[in-house]
Amino acid sequence: MFRSVLVANRGEIAVRIIRTARRMGLRTVAVFSDADRDALHVGLADEARPIGPAPARDSYLSIDRIVEAARFAGAEAIHPGYGFLSENADFAEACRAAGLVFVGPPPAAIRAMGSKAAAKALMERAGVPLVPGYHGEDQHPDLLAREAERIGYPVLIKASAGGGGKGMRVVTDPGGFAEGLALAQGEARTSFGDDRVLVERYLERPRHIEVQVFADRHGDAVHLFERDCSIQRRHQKVVEEAPAPGLTAERRAVMGRAACDAARAIGYEGAGTVEFIVEGDAFFFMEMNTRLQVEHPVTEMITGQDLVEWQFRVADGEALPLRQDELSIHGHAMEVRVYAEDPARHYRPSIGTLHHLRPPAEGPHVRVDTGVRQGDAITVHYDPMIAKLIVWDRDRPAAVRRLEAALARYEVAGVETNLGLLRRVAAHPDFLAGDVDTGFLDRHPEVLASDLTLPPFAALAAATAAILADWGHAAPGAGADAHSPWGLASAWRLNGDGHQDLTLHHAGIDHALRAFPRPDGTFALEAGGRRGAVGRRDGDALAIDGVRCRVPVVRDRDTFWVIVDGAAWPLRLVDPLAPPRSEGAGGDRLVATMPGRIVAVQTEPGAAVKRGEVLLVLEAMKVQMRLTAPRDGVVAAVRAVLGDLVDDGDDLISFEPLS
Ligand code: MV4
């Protein structure tokens, strides 16, 4: 066995590979970009080498820099992880040329699967089932149209060079073929610099089932069963599980054999994944991924094998660690990807600092693969994944319950996350029933809708307790911290009878609160028509009406993030004397703060309005939000009419400039 390995990756997968390498007694070399100097994977390795600036193309995608780092570090092997250079045949070749073991397949196998059309032709010859279709070289439009007729409508036109859903077009009838072809070719040309396409019968809502294969240098191949990754959003996997719900042992064996045939047909070595789309009892080859996949842990959980260890051993020339008849499925595993993304903004990456990060406790039922810790930042440079949460139990219903419980204990504050979405999937009756296909999220849009509900009383109480406690230590305005809300003396007004009013803002809504502090540090709180007795904070715990609950609070400048039952509520302390915010806009515009429907228009061009006057009412997820004038002025244009569906950031009203 080689004695040292360079891990050409970052984040959770670098951490995960380093762990296995160390357990096997290998010396580990990490690489890092300028943005990752203090990253978790850097500290775990025996040696870590800088490879360039933050943009991946100048660091994690630089073949020269990585091979050079391996040479200087004296590494004997390179593990590419997933993404970045993992499926780059030139990189695999450069490693070999430099005398390094590339922990992955031979360059020719990577190339064979790189072109989707060529891969399908290869698989056809190997007897692997394909969707009825045409993947030939002749691209004459008339020939393609005839092929579409032969296949039968609806058809799907795909970029030959593509993958991952880019350059795909559904055509439902012959009349639309020419236009669909032109669109698909255009997209293929701009995305891949190659306008060749293939045409297939279009399957409406297939399942995505992929088979994990392993092959060794001695011509043997085994499969480690399948994963169902049907729940996806815009070709991004959301949930992955193993085994696939409802798949019979017979079908599993047939698909597993087909996947091994596929691997053998291209002289494969190492870990690979053969993707199928499945409709009813039929399954069809889609593509083969020539790398370790993000979702490999679910396979590890049900087989008890360490796939990275398998990769190292096979790369070193060993025979496969186990025969097919020595592998079996034990229980059921599920993985979800916890992302820093904002549900209210179409799940766009949510950039920021992980001020509070507390994953559920790990054990035999729960595994957390992560590359970040509390205090780390999610940046624009890389994938905004916070962690993969993997659960295991003896059967699928028990695994679903484990997933729900683990998600409820996942605490993240400082960035928005998809945890609410993941919890709604885990709690969905169709998901529990195993009724999953690629249309799941289209069928259940409420699962994707942002968590647009009102903050619970406990969240308002905990934020207020934190604010009062801090205020007790430093008089308003006395703090030296420019960002401190206590510097906002105007937010604090001790009234005649000793109560204090404050406003907390959440998702477009101002929540007016009134606190009645007592000398012992407790207080009564009136909020949202409710009144409750709030005790003193004790670490992350707080008593509300005598009931002690865990409600961690972290402050980020003027925003208090409160976690209640695993849901994070960012509550911004509003300074009543500061000019009202018109989020993302200057004072001359009123923009939508989230996607929704206009349910009231209360102004018109030419109207003179006062700051704070309600001009529009936006309804999103059954909550109505009043959009108010950002300043005194005259309305110049109203761009929304009653009933309009508007998007986050849409310009709704403009004001005449101030003279
Ligand atoms: C298809 C299909 C339906 N019919 N091919 C999407 C990405 C690429 N890997 C293949 N994809 C699909 N190919 C035919 N003939 C539907 C999809 C598809 C899909 C496949 C797997 C997982 C999620 C998906 C989401 C949308 C479309």
Image (cartoon, rainbow, N blue to C red):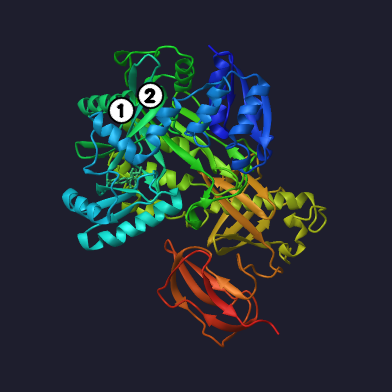
Task: Please tell me in which quadrant of the rendered image residue 17 appears.
Answer: top right
Residue receiving disc 2: 268
Q: Quadrant of the C terminus?
A: bottom right
Identify the residue at the far bottom of this view.
Answer: 606
Say which of 254 and 171 sits in front. 171
State ligand 1's quadrant.
top left
Total marks placed:
2
234 in relation to 646, above or below: above
Residue 262 - label:
1
Looking at the image, residue 530 lies above or below residue 641:
above
Count residues near mark 2 (Cα–Cα under 10 Å), then give few for <14, some for 14-19, many for 20+: many
Residue 147 image offset from top left, x and y in percent = 20, 50
Residue 69: give x, y in percent of width and height: 65, 27
First reached walking from the N terminus: tag 2 or tag 1 = 1
Amino acid of disc 1: Ala
Q: Name the spot of residue 435 as percent of width and height, x first.
A: 27, 42
> Mark on residue 285?
none
Determine if residue 371 is in view: no
Task: Tell whether 188 sits left or right of 551.
Answer: left
Where residue 473 sits: x, y (%)?
78, 49
Whether residues under marks 2 and 1 lie with C-beta atoms below 8 angstroms apart, the answer is yes
Amino acid type of the residue that numbered disc 2 sits on in the rendered structure:
Tyr
Number of residues whose C-alpha sits closer than 10 Å to that of mark 1, classed few (under 14), some (14–19) or many (20 or more): many
Task: Please name the residue shown 55% across and 19% down the image.
Answer: 21
Residue closest to the eye, 304 or 482: 304
